[in-house]
């Protein structure tokens, strides 16, 4: 496994495995590259970022995984299975707790200033992305694809092989214990209420709630701080 620290001019400095500060690796990874910004490297050494990288599934080794880390703080548990190489990118100032599982060429990209109090992301031959400044509460599940095959008993064909993916646009708030399943977008400024089950597209600047989630309010958005209009709200008013 190769670990590179990139300075502001994108010059690489390779770090030997014995100096993997707060990066804990379990299993066999070959042709794997972790690219870390100079800022993130300092945060890793201080213990403000911790990475747990796990080899899962029945394959002998994980081959070709790429992981880019810009800056942030928190605990990132990354489980990588077999199939085509997977790709994971953490933007600037990404923070909190993330549990990410990836198989068969999945791609996950977490946008700048996105936070999570404890979400799980599952991708198999699929993708998950967030725009900037998304806020994800605890016990949230993003299930971008099924974890097992379903067969048509008339002809023996797999009926759930279609590639999926979930995209959160910028400034999206996902409430506690929500579950998002399938292939769709949650558009900019939207709010998913606590406990919602979301399976289809969410309009921008709206609130959805319930099981299945339905739109309950339009022309609204949110701010991280009470009594303060942030720049995202200001752009909308």
Image (spheres, rainbow, N blue to C red):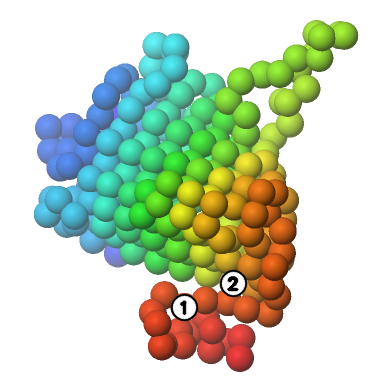
Q: Position of residue 201 (x, y in %)?
A: 72, 56
Would residue 45 appear left or right of 2 to someone viewing this image? left
Quick check: can you spot residue 10?
no
Q: Which mark is residue 189?
A: 2
- Compared with 79, 27 (above or below) is above
Task: Residue at 46%, 24% (x, y): give it.
Answer: 81
Quadrant housing the C terminus: bottom right
Q: Label 2: how many residues lie within 10 Å, few (<14), some (14-19) or many (20+)? A: many
Task: Residue at 49%, 21% (x, y): give it.
Answer: 82
Per the model, the C-alpha gap separating discs 2 and 1 is: 10 Å
Where residue 226 sits, quadrant-wise, is bottom left
Q: Secondary structure at mark 1?
A: loop
Q: Position of residue 148 (x, y in %)?
A: 61, 20
- Compared with 10, 161 (above or below) is above
Quick check: can you spot residue 26?
yes
Q: Which mark is residue 223?
A: 1
Q: Label 1: how many residues lie within 10 Å, few (<14), some (14-19) or many (20+)? A: some
Where residue 48 sits, quadrant-wise, is bottom left
**Which sits in the foreground, 203 or 21?**
203
- Compared with 227, 134 (above or below) is above
Q: Position of residue 57 (x, y in %)?
A: 44, 17
Q: Which mark is residue 154?
A: none
Residues marked 2 and 1 touching at CB (< 8 Å): no
Task: Residue at 53%, 89% (x, y): give it.
Answer: 234
**Which sits in the foreground, 150 or 55?**
150
Task: Residue at 60%, 39% (x, y): give it.
Answer: 144
Q: Position of residue 76 (x, y in %)?
A: 32, 44
Quadrant housing the N terminus: top left
Q: Secondary structure at mark 2?
A: loop
Would residue 12 appear left or right of 198 to someone viewing this image? left
């Amino acid at each position: 496994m190769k670990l590179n620290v990139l300075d502001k001019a994108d010059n690489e400095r390779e770090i030997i495995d014995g100096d993997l500060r707060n990066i804990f690796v379990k299993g066999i990874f070959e042709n794997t590259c972790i690219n870390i910004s100079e800022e993130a490297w300092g945060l890793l050494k201080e213990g403000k970022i911790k990475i747990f990288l796990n080899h899962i599934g029945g394959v002998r080794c994980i081959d070709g995984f790429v992981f880019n880390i810009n800056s942030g703080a928190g605990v990132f548990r990354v489980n990588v299975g077999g199939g085509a190489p997977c790709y994971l990118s953490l933007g600037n100032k990404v923070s909190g707790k993330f549990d990410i599982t990836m198989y068969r060429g999945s791609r996950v990209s977490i946008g700048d200033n996105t936070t999570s109090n404890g979400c799980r992301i599952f991708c198999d031959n699929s993708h998950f992305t967030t725009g900037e400044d998304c806020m994800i509460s605890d016990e949230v599940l993003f299930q971008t694809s099924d974890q097992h095959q379903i067969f048509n008993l008339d002809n023996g064909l797999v009926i759930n092989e279609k590639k999926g993916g979930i995209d959160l646009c910028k400034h999206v708030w996902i409430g506690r214990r929500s579950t998002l399943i399938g292939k769709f977008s949650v558009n900019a400024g939207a709010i998913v209420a606590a406990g919602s089950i979301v399976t289809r597209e969410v309009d921008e600047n709206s609130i959805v709630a319930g099981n299945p989630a339905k739109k309950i309010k339009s022309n609204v958005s949110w701010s991280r701080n009470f009594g303060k209009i942030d720049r995202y709200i200001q752009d909308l008013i």
